[in-house]
Image (spheres, grey):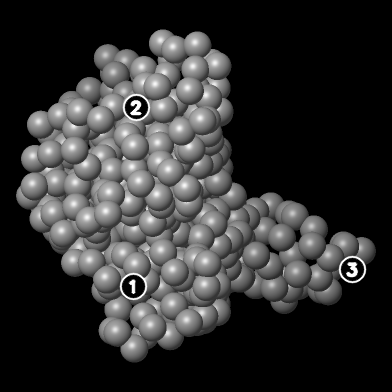
Amino acid sequence: MSNGTRVFVARVAGLPVFDPNGDQVGRVRDVVVALRIGRDAPRVLGLAVEIQARRRIFVPIGRVTSIDPDAVVLTTGTVSLRRFEQRPGETLCLAELLDRSVTVLASGETATVLDLAMEQGRNGDWLVTRVAVRKGGGGLRGRRRGEVVQLAWDEVSGFSLPEDGQGAANLLAVFEKLRPADLAGVMHDLSGKRRAEIAAALDDERLADVLEEMSEDEQVELLGGLEDERAADVLEAMAPDDAADLLGELPTAEAERLLELMEPDEAGPVRNLLAYSDDTAGGLMTPEPVILPPNATVAEALARIRNADLSPALAAQVYVVRPPYETPTGRFLGTAHFQRMLREPPSALVSSIVDTDVDPLQPDCPLADVTRHLASYNLVATPVVDSEQRLLGAVTVDDVLDHVLPQGWRDSGSRNRGLRG
């Protein structure tokens, strides 16, 4: 890295990080800095890098050899795999400084932070030296409202002050392409205040997807911070089994209030799931598998499972039933697996290729037996029927994993504390 190199923080987010051998270590999720007294530029401490299983580690900036448009390369030596935990005196550039309201000292204008630039000095230290802001109007003669300008760090103030009602639009723009599970991982390491601000900025569908990837405590915290009407809308956007799991963590009166605010068609399946214990097939199942009549063709079935909104487990098979075709359905006839459908003529009827060798589960089947059933028959999903052989839903392997993995698996990993040098 040559001295004088200027790197914008938002462009670093998501870059792959490679060791000297060319093996990828992970991806950059943020830049860790230490704010300093007065107007001195913050010192860059290192990078928060996400490795496997959504774990974030700290990579000291001194270990970085180069920051290119397409990658970050590290020097030789080992990298600590201890989970990154923000320490006192540390600030995350993307998570905490983007969208912040600051004051342009020359004019007194209020501006919003869009990006930050860091540069390496002659002594090898990296400092945050520039701030890209969007002005709020007024102040500078001849400048139009909302103009984007780039200023030196000491030309603005307000970074050291508590921020109430900080937005999240620019932060979310940086992380726009993250999958819900990865965005949930980013939010996990933020303060409760910042998580709430990001939740407020997400649309209902995106927030629902992210909530489904969070721990139960974080789900309850975020949902509790929403207005009741918004919370009900987000619950409607969630998969019914995930919504039922979340409502099951709330006090009964609060859960009932939110159910009353939901549309009846959306609340009905969730109420049905809440009637079952959460460690049974009934409590684990989704009431919205792919259901088809016996006269449907293989072509129709394949078209249904191509739906990008279906999880891989739900898209692996269709369930063939007599009418009605919404759960609880008419009599369950069997399961047609997609691999079998791929070997059949498109005009063949799904009823001619259903698998009836594996018995469906009853809704009161305990979790241990559900797990054993999926493992014994190498299934990614299995139907659940009532005593009259009506299809109630399907249990998928990802639903089971959520319940059999240790509590706190989403944020597992050792914690490191203290002040970094």
List x then y, in percent, for residue 367: 12, 53
Determine the image quadrant of residue 251. Answer: bottom left
Separation of residues labelled 1 and 3 (CA atoms): 54 Å
Identity, as a three-letter code, of the amino acid under mark 3: Arg
Looking at marks 3 and 2 on the same chain, the residue that comes earlier in the sequence is marked by 3
Residue count near mark 2 (Cα–Cα under 10 Å), binned few <14, some 14–19, many ≥20: many
Q: Which of the two discs, 3 and 2, sits closer to the camera?
A: 2
Per the image, the residue denoted by label 1 is 247
For the residue pair 381 and 186, the one nearer the viewer reads as: 381
Query: Which structural element holds mark 1?
Result: helix
List x then y, in percent, for residue 46: 33, 45
Whether residue 99 sits left or right of residue 94 in the image: it is right
List x then y, in percent, for residue 63: 28, 33
Per the image, the residue denoted by label 3 is 141
Separation of residues labelled 3 and 2 (CA atoms): 74 Å
Query: Which structural element holds mark 3?
Result: loop
Separation of residues labelled 2 and 1 (CA atoms): 35 Å
- What residue is shown at x 72% (from left), y 76% (from top)? 108
Q: Does residue 87 lie above or below 138 as drawn? A: above
Residue count near mark 3 (Cα–Cα under 10 Å), binned few <14, some 14–19, many ≥20: few
Identity, as a three-letter code, of the amino acid under mark 2: Val
Residue count near mark 1 (Cα–Cα under 10 Å), binned few <14, some 14–19, many ≥20: many
Looking at marks 1 and 3 on the same chain, the residue that comes earlier in the sequence is marked by 3
Query: Which structural element holds mark 2?
Result: loop
Q: Which of the two discs, 1 and 3, sits closer to the camera?
A: 1
Per the image, the residue denoted by label 2 is 354
For the residue pair 152 and 237, the one nearer the viewer reads as: 237
Identity, as a three-letter code, of the amino acid under mark 1: Leu
